C-alpha cells in the first residue's frame, strides 16, 4: 500500500470518518489493475489510489459504499459474462465486465468504520468509570466537566461542539444533580444517536419537566434514556458505569444505534444493455436515447455497439426487465 494511502487512512481514522479499502488480489491481463494495487474510497465517492480502469472503478465504488452501509467485507470477481457462474460462491460478488477486454480482476473490499464515540458529562465516580471502561473497549471516550470550565455549567455547549458530536455519537449526562438540566439541554441540541441521563426516576421526571416548561419539545425529550443503563437495581457508581456500557453495547448489537452516519443519497443506477454492468446515472459519461428512453453505458465501446443496432439491445433490455 502506498504511503499516501496509509497517511490518508490514518487521518480519516483519527477523525472518526468511515472509508473502505479496495485491494486487487488477482488479475488477468490485459486488465489495468495489478495484484497489490489499492484504493481508498470515502463515503462521498472520492477515490485515492488505483484499482482498475473505467469498467472496474464504478463497480468497486458501488460495492465500497455498500460495505460501508452493512459493515461487511466482500470479494468481487469482475470478468466476462460467460465465466461468472464458475466464480459464484458465498461471500463473492460477481460482476460482468466487458469493455472489449479479456481481462478479469478479483478485488477485496473492506470497510474501516470509526470506533464508537462516547461523551460523558460530569465529574462523578460513575462518569469517570464509564469513560475509562469505554476506552478499554477501544472506543473513543471523553469525560467533560463543565463546572471546571470558565463558563461554568453554561459551558456545556462549546464542550460538545469541541467534541464534534455526530449522528453516531453517544452522550451520557452523569452530572448527578449539579447541572443536569443544562447538560441535558445541550446534549439534546446535538444529533447524538443516544442521550442518557444518570438519575433516579423521580429526578428524571423533574429534569424533563423543567426542560419541557422551557420549550424543549416532547420529541426531543423522548430521545432521553433515563435512568441510563440496564436496570441492575441499587448498585455502586462503578457498577452504574457497567450497566450503561452494557446498554450501549446491547443497542449497537441490536442495530438500534447507527454505526456510520447515513449519507443523503440520490444514487440512481441503470444496467448497461450491452454488457450488463451497473452504471451510476449521475456519473454516466456515455448515454443514448432510443424511442424516448435513455440508456446508459459503461464505456464508449458499449455505446458504439448500441448505436450500431439499438433496436436489438432495447428489446434485450425489455426482456430482462430493465
Image: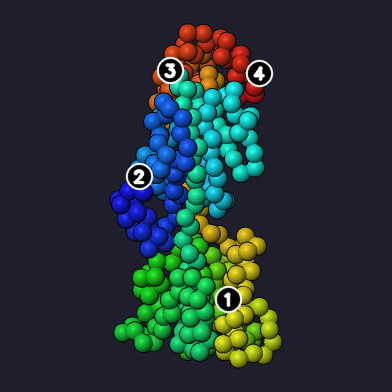
Q: Element type at marker 4?
A: helix
* Pair 1/3: label in front: 3
Task: Of the two numbered discs 2 and 4 on the same chain, state the one appearing first in sequence.
Answer: 2
Classify mark 3: helix, strand or loop: helix
| Quadrant of residue 75 within the rendered picture | top right
Establish if 20 lies above or below 61: below
Residue 100 location in percent, x, y?
A: 45, 19
Give residue 254's position: percent from left, percent from top.
Answer: 65, 62
Distance between mark 1 and mark 2 Cα atoms: 36 Å
Q: CA distance from mark 2 to mark 4?
A: 38 Å
Q: Earlier in the sequence, mark 1 or mark 3?
A: 1
- Mark number displayed over residue 48: 2
Which one is in front in this view, the residue at disc 3 or the one at disc 4? 3
Q: Which residue is tagged 1?
A: 245
The label on residue 301 is 3
Calculate the distance from the C-alpha at mark 1 to the C-alpha at mark 4.
54 Å
The residue nearer to you, when weighing 29 against 137, is 29
Which residue is rendered at x = 54% and y = 49% of the image?
73
Whether residue 17 is situated above or below residue 184 in the rendered picture: above
Q: Image point 57% across, 24% down: which residue? A: 81
Could you classify mark 4 by the number of other residues whose Cα lies within 10 Å: few (under 14), some (14-19), or many (20 or more)? few
User: Contact (CB < 8 A) between labels 1 and 2?
Assistant: no
Q: Earlier in the sequence, mark 1 or mark 2?
A: 2
Quarter occupied by residue 147: bottom left
Which residue sits at x=60%, y=33%? 87
Q: Determine whether label 2 and label 3 are within 8 Å by CB.
A: no
Residue in front for this viewpoint, 226 or 17: 17
Amino acid at each position: 500500500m502506498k504511503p499516501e494511502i496509509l497517511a490518508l487512512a490514518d487521518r480519516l481514522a483519527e477523525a472518526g470518518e468511515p472509508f473502505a479499502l479496495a485491494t486487487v488480489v488477482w488479475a488477468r491481463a490485459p486488465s489495468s489493475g495489478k495484484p497489490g494495487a489499492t484504493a481508498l474510497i470515502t463515503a462521498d465517492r472520492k477515490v485515492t489510489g488505483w484499482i482498475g480502469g473505467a469498467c472496474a472503478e464504478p463497480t468497486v465504488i458501488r460495492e465500497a459504499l455498500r460495505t460501508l452501509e452493512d459493515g461487511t467485507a466482500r470479494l468481487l470477481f469482475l470478468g466476462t459474462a460467460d465465466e461468472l457462474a464458475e466464480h459464484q460462491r458465498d461471500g463473492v460478488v460477481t460482476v460482468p465486465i466487458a469493455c472489449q477486454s479479456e481481462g478479469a480482476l478479483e478485488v477485496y473490499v473492506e470497510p474501516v468504520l470509526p470506533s464508537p464515540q462516547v461523551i460523558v458529562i460530569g465529574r462523578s465516580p460513575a462518569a469517570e468509570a464509564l469513560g475509562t471502561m469505554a476506552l478499554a473497549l477501544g472506543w473513543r471516550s471523553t469525560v467533560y466537566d463543565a463546572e471546571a470550565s470558565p463558563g461554568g455549567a453554561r459551558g456545556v455547549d462549546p464542550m460538545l461542539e469541541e467534541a464534534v458530536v455526530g449522528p453516531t455519537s453517544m452522550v451520557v449526562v452523569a452530572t448527578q444533580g449539579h447541572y443536569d438540566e443544562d447538560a441535558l439541554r445541550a446534549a439534546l441540541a446535538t444529533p447524538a444517536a443516544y442521550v442518557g441521563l444518570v438519575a433516579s426516576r423521580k429526578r428524571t421526571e423533574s429534569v424533563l419537566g423543567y426542560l419541557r416548561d422551557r420549550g424543549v419539545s416532547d420529541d426531543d425529550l423522548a430521545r432521553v434514556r433515563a435512568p441510563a443503563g440496564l436496570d441492575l437495581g441499587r448498585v455502586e457508581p462503578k457498577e452504574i458505569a457497567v450497566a450503561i456500557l452494557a446498554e450501549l453495547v446491547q443497542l449497537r448489537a441490536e442495530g438500534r444505534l447507527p454505526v456510520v452516519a447515513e449519507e443523503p443519497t440520490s444514487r440512481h443506477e441503470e444496467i448497461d444493455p450491452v454488457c450488463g454492468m451497473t452504471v451510476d446515472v449521475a456519473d454516466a459519461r456515455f448515454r443514448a436515447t432510443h424511442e424516448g428512453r435513455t440508456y446508459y453505458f459503461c464505456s464508449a465501446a458499449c455505446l458504439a455497439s448500441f448505436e450500431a443496432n439499438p433496436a436489438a439491445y432495447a428489446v434485450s433490455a425489455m426482456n430482462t426487465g430493465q
